[in-house]
Image (tube, grey):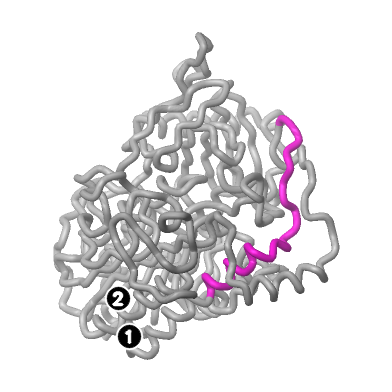
Amino acid sequence: MLLLFTQFVFASFVFASSGDFLVGQDTGDAKLPNFVIFVVDDLGYMDIGANNPNCFYDTPNIDRLAASGMLFTDGYAVNPVCSPTRYSLMTGKYPTRVQATNFFTGSRSGKFRPAKLNNKMPLDEITIAQLLKPKGYATFFAGKWHLGETEEYFPHNRGFDVNIGGHSAGGPYSGNKYFAPFENPQIRIKSQPGDHLPDRLAEETAAFIRDNKDRPFLAYLAFYSVHTPLMGRPDLVEKYTAKAALVEGVSFADEEQVLGDKPRTVRILQKHAVYAAMVQAMDQAVGKVLTQLEQSGVADNTVVIFTSDNGGLSTSEGSPTSNLPLRGGKGWVYEGGIRAPWIVRYPNVTGPGTKSIEPICSIDLFPTIAAAAGISTESKIDGINLAPAFNGQSLGREALFWHYPHYSNQGGFPGGAIRQGDYKLVERYEDGRTHLYHLKTDPGESQDLAPSMPDKVLQMRKRLHAWYQDVDAKFLQEKNGNQPWSPSGS
């Protein structure tokens, strides 16, 4: 029955890059699939064994998930920091459309003032939970929300029946503690001394699955891990301290070639024991939820999606991980800041241990879930249904775009980017400089092809600027009488 259903859905819902659909429209009577979504905070592309065979961190549960589904080698977050990506996962839209282009409420200034920031997900946006509820789905959210400052913007008012810990703040509960007692200005988790936040969030998610196994459900687990503060479980810290002692090499280097204009200290070797402990604890929490799917007898009818909100933290705040060979990290529009782990396990659809090189992005979650559930939406979306990629076909995607008109806490410059095929163009917003890279042969973005390929730069830049107009992109503002570059003048 599930196979027939998915074949019907895939035949009926291969979206273009955007579309107009009716929310809640029923397209068939077949059994609806469940959805489990894992979003990890600040987890780098190279932080899981499935992407990095030399990974310092042990991630057996995530690796097994990849082995049982499809691994996307060219998966992205829509932004190098958290809130914009979370917005796109919820809505299927580029956050630039509503000026939600930085973490809420980041306002760091630099040579110029940043673009104006909308620090909330508008109430008229339809979330994936609101999309699914008319079809009878039970909906659950646990963990980091960070999409609005006041309660009307919180998960329990945005379509989620259950909200465990989702509120305005970006960090873990008050006092920034990963260990009990867990205090939250909106939601309290009953805890015992010694409880660990990732494990408790997983327990709550597993309980929801167990209680709703006889109806379709959406379980969205957005870990606070592995975001700072760097706090690991003592047993795992001890394990990785011993492991790190066996790793030879220098952990940091001033890498001018990594980040451009001036040398910047960047972690080049994974061996941070506390961060490693946080990664493995998160992996164990993922395993707890996956085990519950099996125990509840619903694993064969549950679509599982695993991703991160941005790249790994490598240039500030303890610089706990290395993204090499990718350039930069969280807060940068280079690959290290935006390329993210992406795994999809869709029973009877994605083959075990398969891989796709199709470029995908966080904007694609919403339309993919809509298609799988036989639902369409009447609002314009930017993402596309990933169904063709599940079948090994091309998505026919013209381009992906990034827009970050801010100075990141991690040292990143204000800039935008476009990826077309294997080429990526980076544009700096302070002065309009551009850089061109061929990602297939140079994933580390070390060879700037712009001087030797001016026609390619011009073509991609025109396409990027057309996208700026389409999404009403805003740019840097003057500071102390100094005017920044503007695309209108290019």
Three-letter residue code for mark 1? Val
Name the element at disc 2: strand
Res 209 → quadrant: bottom left
Q: Which mark is residue 298?
A: 1
Front in this rendered view, residue 407 or 93: 407
Residue neighbourhood size for the residue with mark 2, other residues' Cα within 10 Å, grouped as few (<14), some (14–19), many (≥20) = many
Front in this rendered view, residue 482 or 395: 482
- The residue at the far top in this view is 481
Q: Tell me how far mark 2 sits from mark 1, CA to CA.
A: 8 Å
Tell me residue 3's x, y (percent): 32, 82
Q: Name the residue under label 2.
A: 34
Front in this rendered view, residue 393 or 431: 431
Tell me residue 337's x, y (percent): 57, 48
Contact, CB < 8 Å: mark 2 with mark 1?
Answer: yes
Tell me if residue 361 is in the magenta stretch. Answer: no
Which residue is found at the position 23% from the left and 47% from the top? 125
Is 309 rendered above or below residue 238? above
Is 143 rendered above or below residue 101? below
Q: Residue 214 carries which label?
A: none
Which residue is found at the position 24% from the left and 81% from the top? 212
Q: Is residue 335 visible?
A: yes
Which residue is found at the position 39% from the left and 88% from the top? 294
Tell me residue 405's x, y (percent): 48, 31
Is 467 rendered above or below residue 358? above
- Closer to the chain start, of discs 2 and 1, is 2
Tell me residue 11's x, y (percent): 29, 68
Three-letter residue code for mark 2? Asn
In the figure, is residue 206 to the left or right of 239?
A: left
Q: Give the range drawn in magenta.
A: 261-283
Which residue is found at the position 53% from the left and 38% from the top? 417
